[in-house]
Amino acid sequence: MINFIPNDPLVTDVMPMRRVTAKRDRPAGRAGIILADEPPQASYPPGSPEFVAWQARQGAILAIEAWEKALGKPLTSWAQDADNPASMLVVSDAGEDLNAYYDRATLSFFHATKGNTTWYSGASTDVVAHEAGHAILDALRPDLWAVNLLEVGGFHEAFGDVTAIVTALADRKTREVLLKLTPKLDKANFVEATAEELSEAIRQFYGPGVSASQPRRALNKFTWQLPQTMPKTGGPNVMIAEVHSIARIMSGCFWDVLRGVFLKSGKTTQTGLWAATKIASALFYEASRSAPAVPRFFRAAGRAMVLADEQMYGGKHRDVINQAFLNHGLALGAAGLLAAELVLEGAPPKVRRNVVSVEENTIQDLRGRFAAGSRKPASVTTAELGGEPMANVTLYSEVSLDAVDPRLKGVVAAVNTATLVGSSGGSAALMAAPRSGAPSAEVVDFVRSLVTNGQIAFKLNGGNNKPKKGAVPARPTVPGLGTTHAVRKRGAKQELLRIRFACGWSVL
Ligand SMILES: [Zn+2]
């Protein structure tokens, strides 16, 4: 038996610590979890490193199981680009910081001490599930790792927060307590709020003006606007052009879909809540899988959710989804994705055994129109949107970061231009593509947000593309979210690359 906090150490008044049987190791053939430094199994006091180790392991396994229960299918592997696709290493205390990471090698958690109090980020199931969520999305959409777009980064953070919510709702006792607090899911509560204790620790270190000093809430009224028009910095109640901040728009859409499906079902019990959770999560997961990685990724995900609903539930939740996204300033018009815009060179994409192929002259046509500087081979993946066989063709180019910051002189960043190719009248046809030039401009904006928030390691152990397992990360250069990107040498070039997702506020 172990001691386990099912939600977050700061909300144990509503959702107390329990003594539970430690989860067995995940069976072979399923995405596994290995604790880096496993103490003997016992009921350790909360706040001790041994407690945190078993707590983090339990939280990570519960997060995977929550998605498996919601989707009704096993998660069999981590990302193929992960250090070990069969098992993810959980480092329950990787050193001193107010942070948590997913870096394709580990889920890493940290501790920080002030006066007599020590906070452990791994002690919160919210935080652990959030990091596991990054890893689960990375397995589903490995391409998103390298996409330098604010809404794509924001979506990754939202997937983490949604994972924390789904993990909470997979627990029957949590659903019962939640429905007593807010039968219509319309009052602030411990489930839609995530990482309460880590946010409080950040507040005690850095004060209430820091964006991460309050829990992120999925029950919110934030509305989308072009990220370029958002303030660059601001406190927790301001929507700023930063990935964790804008994640609240997408987690807000998820919560509103969940609430809408739940209320519409008329089944107001905890069983009804779990049924609604399964529907909302399955739609969100499917949208995550199929939305093309365009600059306006939030809208693309919403459209993909509507189209997934048509495929999976005959369009039963279309109004709920449209309203949820409209609540957050995103008008969807999902059917637009299924209407051809332009005829392209070549025959329509061909799908054979779930593998899609596109003629080379179609790709050349796309290059000419959308990414003239593109040289690397394009990637072609299947896009199942609304039952139409389509191809997601991504063209690769790069943009100079000279103008962003003097420390980025001579450094480039990858630009992924995602286009959707379908058919019309027996010919290949363009269904959706960003406007010419838009992806490079958006990449530059994204890198600016990384500079503003202290997320770039400008000089780094040249050429070493992966941090050591469990290594204490490079200290950030300004107080901020923690390093997520680094300048690496690639041939004669220097390129800005993602090294991890970081989800707190780094101690200098
Ligand atoms: Zn995160």
Image (cartoon, rainbow, N blue to C red):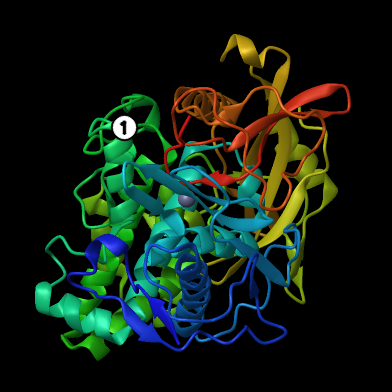
Which residue is nearer to you in this view: 216 or 392?
A: 216
Which residue is nearer to you in this view: 363 or 150?
A: 150
Residue located beneath label 1 in the image: 206
Classify residue 317 by image quadrant.
bottom left
Residue furthest to the right = 491
Query: Ligand 1 within 8 A of label 1's CB?
Result: no
Measured as percent of width and height from the top left, residue 444 is found at 56, 24
Q: Please report the residue visible at 84 percent of the width from the left and 48 percent of the height from the top.
A: 360
Q: Please report the residue visible at 65 percent of the width from the left and 75 percent of the height from the top.
A: 31
Q: Please report the residue visible at 48 percent of the width from the left and 42 percent of the height from the top.
A: 97
Which residue is nearer to you in this view: 152 or 355?
A: 152
**Residue 319 seen anywhere in this rendered image of the structure:** no
Looking at numbered disc 1 in the image, what kind of residue is underneath it? Answer: Tyr
Position of 23 relative to 345 (above/below): below
Q: Please report the residue visible at 83 percent of the width from the left and 43 percent of the height from the top.
A: 377
Is 412 on the left-hand or right-hand side of 234?
A: right
Measured as percent of width and height from the top left, residue 262 is found at 22, 78
Classify residue 223 by image quadrant.
top left
